[in-house]
Image (cartoon, rainbow, N blue to C red):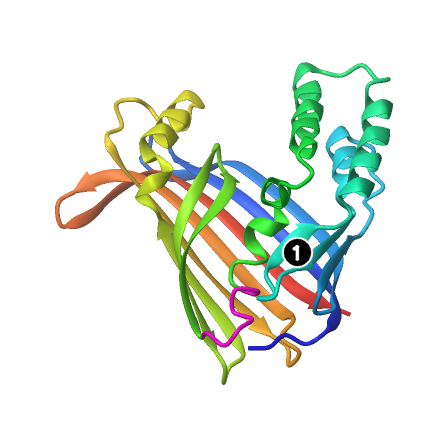
Amino acid sequence: MELENYSRKYRTNYKEVVLKIDDAKELVEVEKEEDERNFEMEYTGDTLKINYEKTGEDSIIKKIDSIFEELVFSLDLNKNIDKLINIETINQKFEEVRSDLFQRELAPDEEDLIYKFSSLLENNNNLADIYKEYYLFKYLFLGIYELSDTKKNIEKELEVKKIFLTDMLFDIKMKYDEEENEIEIKGKDSLKFGAVNYVIKLIKNGYLKERMNGGLSVSLKGKYILNEDKSIKKGFLEIVVKYQKVAYMAEGDIFLEIRHLFNIEEVE
């Protein structure tokens, strides 16, 4: 599946929905987060450039977010993301933003956010931390560039950073349908990612009660439909975390459900 050069505009929408059991034993929505962005992606064979639409907002998160308005990656021989080329520009932008923010009166959590990004950018060669922390890359490249060679099926282990309180490790299977020109993605949590610690964090944050004895399950599914030049036309990815009662030979009642929903579509 050889990728052709292209330049495309996209709209993405990310939703995180938390459902929790109430006194009536029904799942009700307790939290919801939504983020929509527009960007342009240009692929040249050797590089991948992403330009985000400016938001114009003055919040601290948006200020820090603005340093990633343009990302330029080099690609290796297999067309996988290799290095972040414009890291020096990003560092320079961050220094300007940090200088501006520290002239304000900041809350402790806002200061922590700034120091977190400072730490993130200290290692200029650690591309993995930079793009895994930036939410779009959790979802956009689950298989697009891995399937750019002649393989039609790929099984791999993939880490997705910061999915609701913790990092997760997925066993991923990807299948490219040449006739339909689409990529199907399925995955489940790897036992290596530490489910026990995840449940402890859920309890500490008030999403579960300690007396709720149950089991954790995580599923992932998605599909990307491609254009003739192998750029993305539209797609979705869904990660669902469930904590439910353990029942013999059947699925028990669900105590908590967390849905991560990502959609992308090409726009004119």
Quadrant where the C terminus lies? bottom right
Confirm whether residue 22 shows in the render.
Answer: no
- Horizontally, residue 139 falls left or right of residue 104, namely left
At x 83%, y 47%, the residue is: 54
Q: Position of residue 130 (x, y in %)?
A: 64, 41
Q: Quadrant of residue 213?
A: top left
Q: Position of residue 185 (x, y in %)?
A: 44, 63
Q: Is residue 150 magenta?
A: yes
Confirm whether residue 196 shows in the render.
Answer: yes
- Horizontally, residue 181 falls left or right of residue 26, namely right
**Is residue 221 or residue 167 the one in the foreground?**
167
**Is residue 244 or residue 231 the one in the foreground?**
231
At x 86%, y 24%, the residue is: 100
Q: Is residue 154 magenta?
A: no
Quadrant where the N terminus lies? bottom right
What's under tag 1, amino acid-wise? Thr
Element on which disc 1 rests: strand
At x 65%, y 19%, the residue is: 109
Q: Position of residue 93 (x, y in %)?
A: 83, 36
- Horizontally, residue 112 falls left or right of residue 8, namely left
Residue behind mark 1: 12
At x 45%, y 23%, the residue is: 205
Q: Which residues are magenta?
A: 144-151
Q: Name the outermost residue toward the left.
A: 248
- Horizontally, residue 236 falls left or right of residue 10, namely left
Secondary structure mostly seen in the magenta stretch: loop
